[in-house]
Amino acid sequence: MDLVTSLKTMKKNSLAFKIWKYLILFSIIILVFLWLFQVVLLDRYYEFSKQEESKKIASFLAQEDLTSSEAEQIAYEQDICIELTNQYETIYQVGSCFLNTSHAKLKFLNEQKKESTYIYENERFNKKTLVFSKKLEDNHYLFISTSLEPLNKTASILASQLLYVTIAVFILSFVVAYFISKKISKPIEKLSTVSKEISKGNEKVCFQVDEDIQELDALANSLNEMRMELEKTEELRRDLMANVSHDLKTPLTLIKAYAEMVRDLHYKNKKKREQSLNTIIQETDRLTVLVNDILALSKEEANVEILNIEKVDCIQMIEDVLMRYTILKEEGYQFLFEHPEKAIIKADKKKLEQVIYNLVNNAINYTGNDKKITIRLLELENAFHIEIMDTGKGIKKEDLPHIWDKYYQTNKNHQRNIYGTGLGLSIVKNILEHHHFNYGVQSKKNKGSCFYFDIPK
């Protein structure tokens, strides 16, 4: 009753019910084939096997050229009749030759075939005879005849036996299929239950299965990886919201404060008014840069822009980017650019300029007291290798895989600087991956960092 009740409570679209249904269906198909070949097609298969057996014996006799005594031994062992004739007389006839096969022999001779099989039925005695005829060399003919015993009683016995077997197998498959379906579906149901906890915001759960099933283990591992990525994404989202809020709030506060100062205090003092207005302009520019970086990153991550691949003079492109920093040379910054005589590449010029610009900005922000930034363009066998190096404190080894994340900070406290928004390296990563360029970073403590990428020729 418990089994029947459990089956009734199963949902028809559940995995357990479907597995149970398919296993039952599989058992039914096996039983149908069993009935078909053991009962329905038994006579035909019996005749076919006898015919194939007669062919093999005929081929053997034709090749070996046996004597009558040797043929008699084979006929006795196989309970058949073997007759060798020519066009005029019988050479030998051995075995159980009480069957009348003259009609078959006459028909074969008239048809002039190489070999043929005939089946004759004696309605009076309800018996069948199979005669296999084969033409040999030198106009000799070989006839092998055997009695096809009626299989009605055998088929009846098999049918009776199969009836009990069918009932037993069906009941057994009904029960076994239920337990197999429950065993397979239970760990999946468990994984589904745990996944619902994640949808409720519980990201500390762990996916695991108790069954030693490779596919389920792989599924559990994939779900655990997904959970960890969701946890990282949620943490990143919180950091991003906090950092973006900070970066938006600070310039807006300054803009408002200096605007009020101009309105209330410095509107008559030209010098102080211009200072306040310059601060407003700088903070507005910073706000514009931040918003543009956020929009650029969103577009890169969504892949909504199609790359405009064209031939680009890489040397001229880098020199154009460095021209933007001419004013920083007055503050003591040094920009060293090493390059070959010529470097023509294929890329989206606008986006690659953004990559160079962001990496140079990053180097400016973190370079050492010597304020030295080195840009190196090397021509390799199959690619152009670009390096942008600073002389700062370097990056810890455990932080290297995360520096491409949005707003990633080793101390988790976002500090706003003059030139950066915290999104530059994320934009670099997305543009280079969109181009399918190899990229990376190398860093040594107190010796600086080297960001690099390769452009295939």
Image: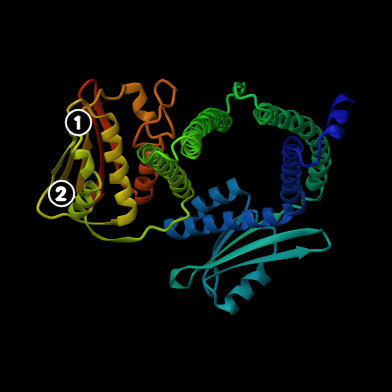
Q: Earlier in the sequence, mark 2 or mark 1?
A: 1
Packing grade of label 1 (10 A; few <14, some 14-19, many >=20) is many
Instruction: Provide residue 89's location: percent of width, then percent of height.
Output: 55, 71
Location of residue 71 with respect to 24 vertically, above or below: below
Quadrant including the N terminus: top right
Identify residue type, mark 1. Lys
Badge 2 density bin: few <14, some 14–19, many ≥20, Cα 10 Å = few
Q: In the picture shown, does residue 33 fall above or below 442?
A: below
- Residue visible at 65% across and 70% down in the picture: 104
Write down the residue under mark 2: 381
Q: Which residue is mark 1?
A: 371
- In front of the other: 39 or 112: 39
| Furthest residue toward left | 341
Q: Residue furthest bottom?
A: 110
Mark 2: secondary structure: loop
Q: Amino acid at mark 2?
A: Glu
Q: Is 47 positioned to the left or the right of 326 in the image?
A: right
